[in-house]
Image (cartoon, helix red, strand yellow):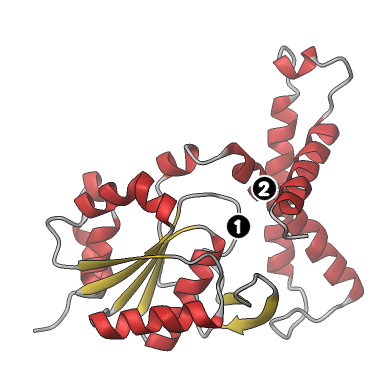
Amino acid sequence: MKRETISDAVGKISDRHILEAETYAAAAGKKALVLISQGGYKRIGKMIEDSFAENNCELVFDYFNGECSANEINRLLKVVKDNGCDLTIGIGGGKIFDTAKAVAHYAGTQVFICPTIASTDAPCSALSVIYTDEGVFEKYLFLPANPNLVMMDTEIIAKSPVRLTVAGMGDALATYFEARACQRSEATSCAGGNTTGAAMALAELCFDTLMEVAKAACAEGDTLHNMPFTVTPESVFAAIKAADAYGRYYLGEE
């Protein structure tokens, strides 16, 4: 019997299920490894299980050990093999996504990514950053394709820690300056090419979008003007960047 494709499934989704991953998962596999943090499972585990309750795709939950390392990837590959999983789903943040993408790559399964925070671009990239078990950078794993599906629930994102959302804004702002520096120096990217016009346009769009937010925050009558100093869009912009840098320092990323 021919398995239904993801495109077929998308065409059958009702409005009520438009953001529910189980409909897509059923078209991609019969048993899915779901990689999630222990805290993430406590917050939304029941929601995920209920979503898949009437679905033919069985779930195998496994808690992420904290680092996208070779040992963690190999451990999860054994889980995939022992349980006969034919789909990998990563739910959470950047290191979970990188681990899920690597596991799917080596196991030969499709990979679905479901962000619960908006602080990283890892959901969409064809790349996994590999660390040691102690959190020291080891290498980049370049993947042949981007994730098969990226799906996020905006309600869950809206309830995520503000600190992580601010970090994501800072990361988006940094994208423009990084891309501009690479373009001006004609540096070769880690993908082996030069900065393209399309990449610069997207990076500039990130910058412009966040600057519009900064300008809105400085609108006449906004409570920001209650500060004992003059608030400008540029100062809000700088504050976002500073908050991101502080967050990275706090997390030991810099």
Residue 38 lies, in percent from the top left, at 41, 55
Kindly identify which residue carries mark 1.
120
The quadrant of the picture occupied by the N terminus is bottom left
Residue at 77% in and 46% down: 246
Residue 141 lies, in percent from the top left, at 59, 83
Amino acid type at image mark 2 = Ala
Q: Nearer the viewer, residue 49 or 165?
A: 49
Q: Nearer the viewer, residue 145 or 69?
A: 69
Q: Is residue 128 above or below residue 167?
A: below
Callout 1 crowding tier (Cα within 10 Å): few <14, some 14–19, many ≥20: some
Callout 2 crowding tier (Cα within 10 Å): few <14, some 14–19, many ≥20: many
Pointer 2 or 1: first along the chain? 1
Residue 97 lies, in percent from the top left, at 49, 67
Amino acid type at image mark 1 = Thr
Residue 184 lies, in percent from the top left, at 90, 69
Q: Is residue 19 above or below residue 224?
A: below
Quarter of the image for residue 171 reads: bottom right
Q: Left or right: 173 with respect to 118?
A: right
Q: Left or right: 66 with respect to 64?
A: right
Quarter of the image for residue 56 reads: bottom left
Q: Nearer the viewer, residue 17 or 244?
A: 244
Task: Identify the secondary structure beneath mark 2.
Answer: helix
Q: Residue 10: in sight, yes or no?
A: no
Kindly identify which residue carries mark 2.
167
